[in-house]
Image: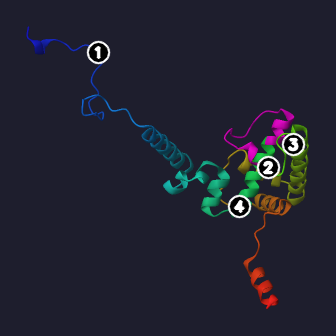
Amino acid sequence: MGRGDRRRGGRPRKVEAPREPSGAVRTPTQRERAEDATQTVVEARMRHHGIDRATARSQHGGSAPGRMLAAGLVDEPEYEALTRYAIIRRRFVVALHGPMEEPASLDVERVSGIDHSDTEAQDRWVAETWRDAARALAQAHPLAHKAIADVATRDVDVPYITPPLRCGLDALVALWGLMPEPSGANKKTQGAEL
């Protein structure tokens, strides 16, 4: 029995693994692990939502409002209105200690205009803001609240803007004063000053 006949102990050698000059399996760096995780997320977004690589790789590819912005279905003020609605709704549910429906990745601390040190005042502000938004949506269209909630908090993709969604977006943009300043108004004002 020669030396070559003896079986090797331990686990089988990884055949195609990248190796160090010493022959040891090379462990990936933190950057390589992060790139691998990002690539996995991008491929999953592309497969699940049917979007291109650039949109899937951007921060907007992770939410229905973001994908609508990337597709050109909504503009920047409407995207901001959907994002604010989702954040305020989540904070309202937190203030009431209710069940969460929204993704945990939603940044509830992003809402400005309140003092985060006084939770009672914060809860009052959130309740008032939520009441105003609900009232504006109810006045805009009977189904506007459901259409906005589906897109903003339940991550439902829509292939086109429905009338309830359009009315709801317009109501929230007007309520929160997110309308962009028209470019023609500046030219008229500048000409009048001369």
Q: Residues within 10 Å of mark 4 (few under 14, many from 20)?
A: some
Q: Is residue 169 above or below residue 17?
A: below
Q: Give the magenta-colored segment's residue range.
A: 91-112
Q: Nearer the viewer, residue 187 or 105?
A: 187
Q: Quadrant of residue 14?
A: top left
Residue type of the residue flagged with mark 3: Gln
Q: Residue 107 vs residue 125: left or right? A: left
- Secondary element at image label 3: helix
Mark closest to the chain's N terminus, 2 or 4: 2
Q: Residue 20 vs residue 182: left or right? A: left
Tell me the number on the disc at residue 146: 2
Mark closest to the chain's N terminus, 1 or 2: 1
Q: How far across and how far down the image is residue 32, in percent?
A: 42, 41
Mark closest to the chain's N terminus, 3 or 2: 3
Residue position marked by numbered label 3 in the rendering: 122
Q: Residues within 10 Å of mark 3 (few under 14, many from 20)?
A: some
